[in-house]
Image (spheres, grey):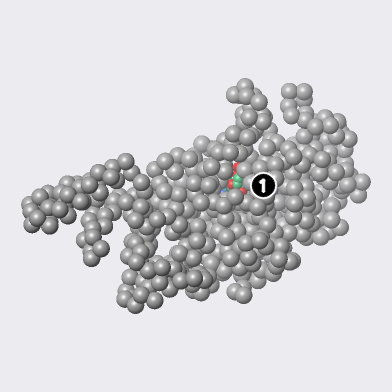
Amino acid sequence: MMTLTLHNTMTRTKELFVPGDPNRVTMYVCGPTVYSRPHIGNARPALVFDVLFRLLRTLYGEDHVIYARNITDIDDKINAAAKESGRPIGDITSEFADNYRADLGALGVLPPTIEPHATAHVGEIIAMIEALISSGHAYEAEGHALFSVSAFDDYGKFSNRNRDDMIAGARVDIAPYKKDPADFVLWKPSSDDLPGWDSPWGRGRPGWHIECSAMIEKHLGETIDIHGGGHDLIFPHHENEIAQSRCSHSGADLARVWMHNGFLTMDKDKMSKSTGNIITVHELSQDHAGETIRLAMLSAHYRQPLDWSDDLLSQAKSTLDRFYGTLDNLSDVDVPAGATPSDTFMSSLTNDLNTPKALAKLSALCKAANKVDDNDERARLKGELLTSGAVLGLLQDDPSSWLKGGVNDDDAEIDALIEARTAARANKDFAESDRIRDELAARNITLEDGPDGTKWRRDS
Ligand code: AMP
Ligand code: ZN
């Protein structure tokens, strides 16, 4: 089997990926906090880890990969959104969880194998906190449960931070009940107007970090193969997940490989809800095909920053137009049974998900397919193109409808005009056929006459 190398944030090197059990490869990615629609920056981890999910399924078999991406449906920002809108919290979280699935589904992101909700795991969360308190890694103070960072020698190692950085970076409250200002919340009290659960420390709600540790333990086990998220999660979120989970599991590693995507900017500014510099996936999907957005995202390596722009989208669209043009020209040959992705494509993708290189290999496959005449070779290349494309979640549309710009209201009218032009040509009425061609050109429709009739595409 082809080997896979992945960059591990823990060791800051690229390593050969060796799962604990190749029949049960486990991956956890921190999912959305559901109080607003995802912006295109939030879509980056979803898309990057969707490609990794597809690649792992290709390498290990579909039934051997378990991918969990949680829904954070307990959070102070959700409570604030509910208060502001006067709507029940459960309505808000289920609406935005549905939007998240729909918006990412439009980009071809596969549903994860498991989608655990924090609110459904409060029992497990309380049990984990109780165990941490009994083993001396956490303590209760004024209705809170706090993790005691001095009880974990490795605290700060993962994110490579010293104490002062950690206190500043975490913006932790220097609350009087904390033994150490770097100690972080596992449980906090809820006032009557806020969601809360009964616990040994009174009515309250869990902190964000412990939710992930408890859901990972329950669904995937003590040590998982891959843990992912955006690089802003390295500290404090992942540092704290590691502290909680390792102290609950006699020091066992939480993940074999830690992966973090770089940040997406717009006009070179960080895209984030707090600065308001955002475009939502939903807005983008009104004007661009899902695969165009997807290819634009995958045109940069996942660890690099990516500046989002209209230019990036139009480049992605013209690349896809070329790919679909090739596939359209191959419409007369069938994909051979048992077709698989090309080796050179796979060797790029298995090198720490080098999507820019993998896309260049797809271009090379198209160039080769455009050149050859032999039908067996054309069929073989078509098989490689489609199966390679599928690992990236691309080239899954029908080529002729892609080239027509998707299904548009005037498609039937264009087909009728083309038929009229064909009839005019058959009658040698070239003035009329040229007139129709010009009329279509004015509507950005380009015609291509071939042995099987006239094909058309819509230029942007
Ligand atoms: P949030 O819903 O804000 O917790 O974010 C969900 C995921 O999106 C996390 O993995 C973040 O790291 C990631 N994320 C948020 N903003 C960006 C961005 N501008 N670029 C890349 N990833 C981001
Ligand atoms: Zn998490």
- Rendered location of residue 401, percent (x, y): 35, 52
- Rendered location of residue 75, percent (x, y): 69, 35
Q: Secondary structure at mark 1?
A: loop
Residue 159, quarter of the rendered image: bottom right
Q: Residue at x 62, y 24 (%)?
A: 87
Would you say residue 168 is visible in this rendering? Answer: no
Q: Amino acid at mark 1?
A: Glu
Q: Which residue is mark 1?
A: 115
Residue 10, quarter of the rendered image: bottom right
Horizontal relation, residue 177 to residue 216: left or right: right
Would you say residue 68 is visible in this rendering? Answer: yes
Instruction: Choose between 425 and 200: the one closer to the eye.
Output: 425
- Rendered location of residue 378, percent (x, y): 38, 73
- Mark count: 1
Instruction: Choose between 87 and 421: the one closer to the eye.
Output: 421
Q: Residue at x 87, y 47 (%)?
A: 132
In the depicted structure, whether residue 350 falls above or below residue 441: below
Instruction: Choose between 304 and 209: the one closer to the eye.
Output: 209
Residue 177, quarter of the rendered image: top right
Q: Residue at x 83, y 35 (%)?
A: 144
Mark 1 residue crowding within 10 angstroms, few (<14) / some (14–19) / many (20+): some
- Rendered location of residue 194, percent (x, y): 73, 27
On whether ligand 2 comes within 8 Å of the CB at mark 1, the answer is no
Horizontal relation, residue 268 to residue 417: left or right: right
Horizontal relation, residue 73 to residue 180: left or right: left
Q: Residue at x 23, y 54 (%)?
A: 446
In the depicted structure, whether residue 209 falls above or below residue 299: above
Q: Quadrant of the N terminus?
A: bottom right
In the depicted structure, whether residue 179 falls above or below residue 151: above
Instruction: Choose between 35 and 69: the one closer to the eye.
Output: 69
In the depicted structure, whether residue 135 falls above or below residue 454: above
